[in-house]
Amino acid sequence: MFFTTPPGKPIDSCRAPALDFDLYNNRPPWPEGDFILSLYEEENCKYTGNATGPGTLKCPSMEKEVVCVEDSDEGVRGKLEACTKPDQAVEWYRRTVFCQW
C-alpha cells in the first residue's frame, strides 16, 4: 500500500491508501514493479522499484525523479503497523520505503 502523509507527520495506516496492493504477493525487502498512483491531487505519478533498493518516484510536475529511501522506525526496517478498523478487525502494514520531495 502507498500512503500519503503531510510533511513532518508519521504515516497513518488507518487512512485510505493512495494505492492498494497485496503486501504478501509483493513481499519486502522492497516493492517491486511499476505502480501508477495519484498523490496530492496529481494523477499519473509512478513509483518504480525492484528487489535491489527502495526505488524512485516521478510525477508529471517534478523536474526529476525522486530517489526514495528506506523507511525505518528506530532502526527497524519493515516494522509492522497495525490499524484497528471500526468493525474491530485489525489490518497490518509493513513500512519499507519513504519518498520525499
Image (cartoon, rainbow, N blue to C red):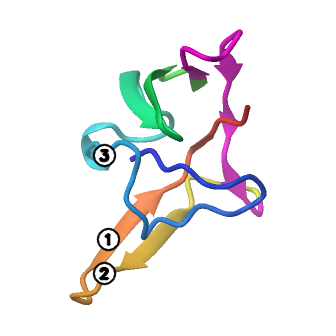
Name the residue type under label 3.
Asp
- Residue 45 shows up from this direction: yes
Asked if disc 1 and disc 2 are in contact, CB closer than 8 Å, the reply is yes
Look at mark 1 in the image and give the residue it sits on: 91
Residue 81 % position (x, y) = 49, 68
* Residue at x 66% of width, y 16% of height: 62
Look at mark 3 in the image and give the residue it sits on: 20
Question: Would you place residue 92 above or below residue 99 in this image?
Answer: below
Q: Quadrant of the C terminus?
A: top right
Q: Secondary structure at mark 1?
A: strand
Residue 60 sits inside the magenta stretch: yes
In the foreground, 59 or 47: 59
Give the mark nearer the N terminus: 3 vs 2: 3
Name the residue type under label 1.
Glu
Q: CA distance from mark 1 to mark 2?
A: 8 Å
Q: What segment is highlighted magenta in the picture?
A: 56-74
